[in-house]
Image (cartoon, rainbow, N blue to C red):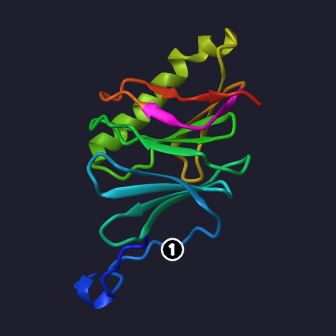
Amino acid sequence: MIPDLPSPEDLKPFPTQVSLDFRFHETCVRSISISPNGLFLASGDESGNVVIWNTRTSKIMRKYTLPHKVVDAVAWCPNAQHCLLLAANEENVHVFAPGLYAQDVNEASRNFLKTAKREYFEDTKANVCKWFFKNDHRGEPMITMEFKNVISKLVCHVKGDYFAPWPITCR
């Protein structure tokens, strides 16, 4: 028994035009995340691209190409005192300071990453995971953490104090 379906005319009004179009990715988008202030959307695709969009205009604000192809997860740090974006691709988690908020927040984000470089150097020696500190293509500080397993999801604590690569699936 198949129920009678309404005609499309009975379902109007439904959207008939596109107001914003987010075009860049040529491969499947695997993850998206909205910034805590709602102004930015981050997306990650199967070609290793992480793109940050303005949600009001659909303009690309930042673009990163990560090694190892597939970006399985992107997540914004929920702490309003920082502008940090995390992206997971394969065994790596990258932490960016994209510099999209007010100048004081951007500076706090850069300082946060520089402080992490000093504080977590000991963990690298202990083989918890390997930490790499470098600059992104704009010269902003960036952290890459290399784990022993594939990271398929990132979960940030509500305060933004820490994150968990979740779940970890073994190869």
Q: Quadrant of the C terminus?
A: top right
Q: Residue at x 66, y 54 (%)?
A: 48
Q: Does residue 166 appear anywhere in the picture? A: yes
Quick check: 103 left or right of 122?
Answer: left
Q: Quadrant of the N terminus?
A: bottom left
Residue 15 x %, y %: 29, 82
Q: Position of residue 59 (x, y in %)?
A: 41, 71
Is disc 1 surrounded by few (<14), some (14 to 19) or many (20+) residues within 10 Å? few
What is the x, y in percent for residue 18? 36, 82
Relative to 35, say whether 121 is above or below. above
- Residue at left offset 27%, top offset 91%: 9
Q: Is residue 16 visible?
A: no
Is 109 rendered above or below residue 161? below
Of residues 113 and 18, the one nearer the viewer is: 18
The outermost residue toward the bottom is: 9
Regarding mark 1 in the picture, which secondary structure is present there?
loop
Q: Position of residue 40 (x, y in %)?
A: 36, 57
Left or right placement of residue 49 versus residue 111 in this view: right
Q: Which residue is mark 1?
A: 23
Front residue of 159/121: it is: 159
Number of numbered callouts drawn: 1
Whether residue 142 is in magenta: the answer is no
Span shown in magenta: 149-155
- Pick the residue in front: 5 or 109: 5
The amino acid pointed to by label 1 is Arg
